[in-house]
Amino acid sequence: MALIVGGERIDDSEIQQEVERLRPHHERVFKDKDSKERQTQLYDWCRENVIEKVLLNQQAKKSGMQIPQQEVERLFEETTRQCGGPEQLHKLFETDDETKIKEQMQLNIKVHKLLEDACRDLPAPSNEAVGRFYEQNKEQFKSAEQVRVAHIVKYIGARTDEETAHSIMRKAQDELSGGAIFEMLVSKYSDCLENGGDLGYITRGQMVEEFEDVAFNLAVDQVSGVFRSRFGFHIAKVYDRKPSEVVPLEDVKDLIVKELEEQIRDKAVDEYIDHLKSQAEIEQI
């Protein structure tokens, strides 16, 4: 089975090559899909990718666009350097003929400039569009829950075995139960004296899971019992909590504008390619 795209024959082997290139990513993203459905979807997408690439290359060749040889040489040198040398460059382009590689690079530059032209003079995202995107995606703009926490810690290692560390921390806990001030016991017992044991505000993912499971379940001014992490024994105290909340629009407006600009560019490229398809004869044989 083959395709004729604008008079150019495309063998199924070219589509299959694109299938193998995209298969790892596609199977990772769509792992929950039925295997047959996933394979059909992958083939259809790759078929469209190949058709679009052929049409863009054909349009670039017909454009009469002139690319200075210096620009091609610069790209060749830069790509060779990024690849780590000529051998990897040859693998990337599947040829060791550097003249053919440079011809392909020149064509790639032309295609890039065609798509740049298709995206010229695009409208900027309106304030209404920015506001709408913000309202529809507020979950994306939530700040993480934070706690300000301090700890007394006894690390387990060459200097202190587990039994000794646990015994020392039980003494600290007994003194806390007797009314001792947490911060005073940091200097007396802890292996982490910096800032009086105060770790500042933390979000989930910053500390080991065993520590976070305790810290994020303490109330303000509450002190934990002795607990174990992979590093040793701890007693934690929470000074403050900041709940997860939606970040104000003004703080994320630039990010939203960038996202909307990307969407506008993608739409312009899609429309340009759809126009090429509408003008081309595409036949399956």
Image (tube, helix red, strand yellow):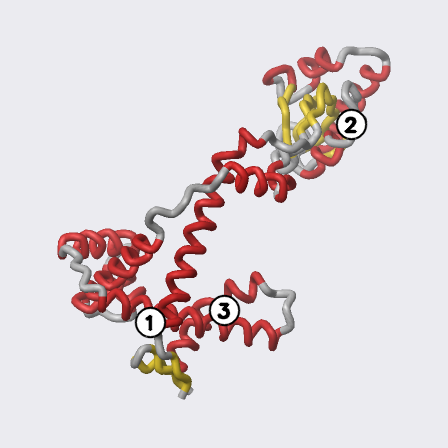
Please give the residue where the numbered disc 1 appears in the rendered image.
Answer: 54
Residue 157 x/y as whole percent: 63, 33
Residue 18 x/y as whole percent: 42, 71
The C terminus lies in which quarter of the figure? bottom left
How far separated are the C-alphas under marks 1 and 2? Answer: 61 Å
Of labels 2 and 3, the one closer to you:
3
Q: Label 3 sits on what residue type? A: Arg
Quadrant assignment, res 210: top right
Q: Nearer the viewer, residue 232 or 67?
A: 67
Please give the residue where the numbered disc 3 appears in the rendered image.
Answer: 23
Q: Secondary structure at mark 1?
A: helix
Q: Going from the N terminus, do you reach mark 1 or mark 2 first?
A: 1
Instruction: Estimate how packed mark 1 is, as few (under 14), some (14 to 19) or many (20 or more) residues with alpha carbons within 10 Å.
Output: some
Q: Which mark is residue 262?
A: none
Residue 275 x/y as whole percent: 38, 66
Is 103 on the left or on the right of 269, as rendered?
left
Q: In the displayed structure, would residue 9 be above or below residue 62? A: below
Q: Which mark is residue 218?
A: 2
